[in-house]
Image (cartoon, rainbow, N blue to C red):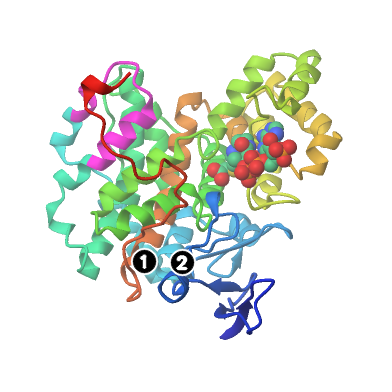
Amino acid sequence: MTDKYYLKQEDASDNGIELTVRKPIQGPPAIDVTKLYRDQGLFTYDPGFMSTASCESNITYIDGEAGILEYRGYPIEQLAAEADYVEVAYLLLYGELPNSTQLQEFDEIITHHTMLNENLKDFFGGFHYDAHPMAIMVGVVGSLSAFYHDSLDINNPRHREISAHRLIAKMPTIAAASYKHNVSEPIIYPSNDLSYCANLLQMMFATPCESYQPHPIAVQAMNLLFILHADHEQNASTSTVRLAGSSQANPFACIAAGIASLWGPAHGGANEAVLNMLTEIGDVSNIDHYIDKAKDKKDSFRLMGFGHRVYKNFDPRANILREMSKKVLEELADSNNPTFELALRLEEIALKDDYFLERKLYPNVDFYSGIIYRALNIPNNMFTVMFAIARTVGWVSHWMEMMSDPKQRIGRPRQVYMGPSRRDFIPLKNRS
Ligand code: CMC
């Protein structure tokens, strides 16, 4: 459905410029400015994409004011309560919940793609012993295109699907191997009789000398975290994947680009930054000092895990994780865990402070995810890697959607140039 919008200059006598308005199924309408430059010689200016829809998508819907998040129409609360991560992965990738046969087939496909080409293992040894696992992820995932040539024809839908399956399946194996490199232990192979999340824990914590039985609550918590992190419409890393893919780059390169974008502390790196921040604060008595720092515009310190570009009342994922963090700490760690106590006190103080209230800064998903990962014995530098595993299905779903869209073309933003006007070259000898 479309409507018309008229862009009119204050002193213009005519009706102004007629623009088409695109009406979504849900959410605010969008003014279509694609022909604005061609017809009127005008650009739109929107750094940070504050008011810009970059594409049409059928995958995920967010209402930031109402705290709504839906995957393919299903509310996140229902998926979190009822579904398995692999089931949600199928939903995001194919658009519908699988029936039991479809789920079994999909699960088998993912399970049988978890192994890595044996030569890929040599890559890990090339990294410095204390390399950040996200650095290893960017490199190794990018290198997959050098190993899986048989699924690289991006114009072939079947190739695209195989690459998507490979990425979803191999991410936990690569992630666990990055961790093993970091702790100087041998890489553990995937085990086909385990679920997606149990297998990841097994590959991280088993050794050739000792098998590892993941605790059921650890598997349940990880399944929940992965569902909540699986997609979030056009966030920075997904937009990076789409932009990289718009140039026809191969899917492994595109996902490596997404991982790089996710790494930043304003995005997926926030979960690691939250735990580092809590460690730095150290004690409840220091909270006021850090709140003052966060409010001081001359200080670059921000309260990590607070604020969100889209959610302005609450992050529905944070509400779900707050409950799970209590459960995990009760079952697996000390429920009087000082880090959790500190986090709850910080949350309480910030939620009463005018600075945070006026700016609608509430705890986001990553305020709690790090606390849970810590209780599962996942080291801080692996938190963002966990996020990357979960988000891979979101990235590949968006990449697949974009690649099958006949309107797809290379993404090429323009700019408002503010540099020097044309000037003549000055030979070196004449420069002061
Ligand atoms: N601590 C202190 N002040 C903040 C914070 C914070 N965490 N977040 C925003 N502000 C202030 C900011 O200084 C600005 O104040 P003013 O209007 O006086 O200039 C106002 O709030 C608006 O902030 P913004 O930076 O313009 O908002 P944004 O939409 O561009 O940024 C954000 C959103 C998530 C990057 C930002 O809130 C932030 O840096 N938060 C901390 C990092 C974090 O937790 N990121 C995880 C996001 S959720 C997971 C994910 O999506 O990956």
Q: Find residue 210 and report its horizontal and vertical position in percent.
A: 35, 23
**Residue at x-position 31% and y-position 38%:** 173
Residue type at mark 2 is Cys
Task: Evaluate whether residue 67 shows in this view.
Answer: yes
Outermost front residue? 430
Queried whether the magenta region covers residue 133, the answer comes back as yes
Residue under pointer 1: 402
Query: Disc 1 vs disc 2: which is toward the camera?
Result: 2
Q: Which residues are magenta?
A: 123-142
Q: What kind of residue is marked 1?
A: Met
> Residue 430 location in percent, x, y?
25, 22
Question: Which is nearer the N-term, disc 1 or disc 2?
Answer: 2
Name the element at disc 2: loop
Q: Which mark is residue 55?
A: 2
- Quadrant location of the N terminus? bottom right
Determine the residue positioned at 39% across, 61% down: 397
| Residues under numbered marks 1 and 2 in contact, where contact means CB atoms less than 8 Å apart | yes
